[in-house]
Image (cartoon, rainbow, N blue to C red):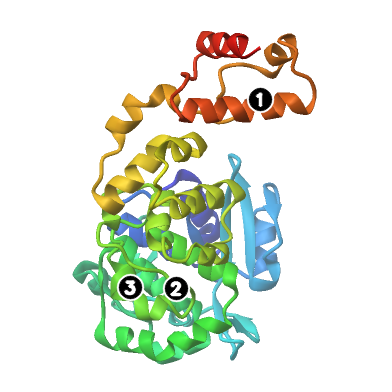
Amino acid sequence: MDKNVKMILERLESAGHKAYIVGGAVRDILLSKTPKDYDITTSAHPQTIIDIFKDEDLYLSGLKHGTVTVILDKKSYEITTFRKDGVYRDHRHPTSVTFGEDVLDDLKRRDLTINAILMDAKGRISDPLNAKKDLDDHIIRTVGDPEKRFEEDALRIMRTIRFRATLGFTIEAKTESALYLKAPLLNEIAAERKADEFLKIVKSDHVIVLKEYQKILTQYLNYTYFKDLDKTDDLAIRLALLFKDDHDELKKLFLNKKMLQAITFLCKHKDSEDLLLTFGEAFDPFTYIEYIRILKGVDLRPFYEENHDYIANENTLKISSFELADLGYKGKDIGLIKKELLKAIRAQKVKNDHDCLYSYLVKML
């Protein structure tokens, strides 16, 4: 357990309050993994938490949800009061949150049993929902009635599938049935949140989940599952394989500009007939080689190595604009001659080599 987490729990306990880590951190510890972050839950109310940690740097943006963030060693630790949610609105958010003293109420509002196990400062497990058995059996099950859980917060549909993808566990039968029944509710969830969950699934070790639950996930966006998706860990290649038939759908994933351009390039050039032009424009030729190898079973490395001297674009042209100016080219003529040089290179009339290009230009003058 993180030393700062242990200290936080001990200070809360010393002040007379119950305090535990809960959720993913406990799950990871029990699976012999190192937690990425820790969620701390306590019977102490927000103002009490603030008073206990008044000498530390605090971040209070989550105060209305009962969360106080303590900054220790430049790292954030969220401490949240035991909560009981009111009626949910918009299939995502509760209309009210009540702070309480009963940790069982807090656990009952959580999504999955494997995320509802408690651990105290001494590393002792508290498991009132008998959730550890599901963890030991590698079972994914909602806390309580699955239809109600997904009706309350439809994003839990994608989270459940994501845990299946990241952990490789089996989704329990009633929970799985409810996934399909409530899948249309995904249309009411913010696209950014769905994109985040979908990308986590795509990055996972068990990408076969994209095929198993395609009927559900296509409530959000359309993709074509590719059988050899697990042959690469590269996110750009995986997405290019999934969206090779409709790369416009990629816009729904809120990818950064560089990543979107890279994936779109792969999709558009999956059937390229002019490899010299394609390699010249490729953001990364080796990513393109890997993409085609997985997509078509064709190894383009020999072609790339054999024709490397004839692969170029304006940015990789081995003669500069200043040198072209010294040769007498001015203004727009510099751009035009660069295009002529690229045509000559791709026609294999001249190599993309400084001395070769210079000699070629001298002969043209």
Q: Are discs 3 and 2 less than 8 Å apart at CB?
A: no
Tell me the kind of residue under disc 2. Asn
126, 228: nearer the viewer = 228
Q: Residue at x 61, y 9 (%)?
A: 362
SS for dot 3:
loop
Locate residue 364 relative to residue 312 in the image: left or right: right
Q: Position of residue 351 (x, y in %)?
A: 46, 18
Q: CA distance from mark 3 to mark 2?
A: 40 Å
Which residue lies under the disc numbered 1? Answer: 337
Q: Residue 127 — which label?
A: 3
Give how far across and how far down residue 229 sits, in percent.
30, 57
Vertical side of 30 occupied by 348: above or below: above
User: Of marks 3 and 2, which one's residue comes earlier in the chain?
Assistant: 3
Q: CA distance from mark 2 to mark 1?
A: 44 Å
In the displayed structure, would residue 231 be above or below residue 113? above
The crowd level at tag 1 (other Cα within 10 Å; few <14, some 14-19, many 20+) is some
Q: Earlier in the sequence, mark 1 or mark 3?
A: 3
Q: Amino acid at mark 3?
A: Asp
Q: Is residue 299 left or right of residue 54?
A: left
Residue at mark 2: 222
Q: Quadrant of residue 43?
A: bottom right
Q: Nearer the viewer, mark 3 or mark 2?
A: 2
Q: Can you give x and y, in whole percent of width and height, for residue 82 in the image?
A: 54, 74
Question: Are the residues flagged by discs 2 and 1 in contact, CB closer than 8 Å?
Answer: no
Is residue 19 shown to the viewer in this render?
no
Residue, x 70% and y 66% (percent of image)?
Answer: 47
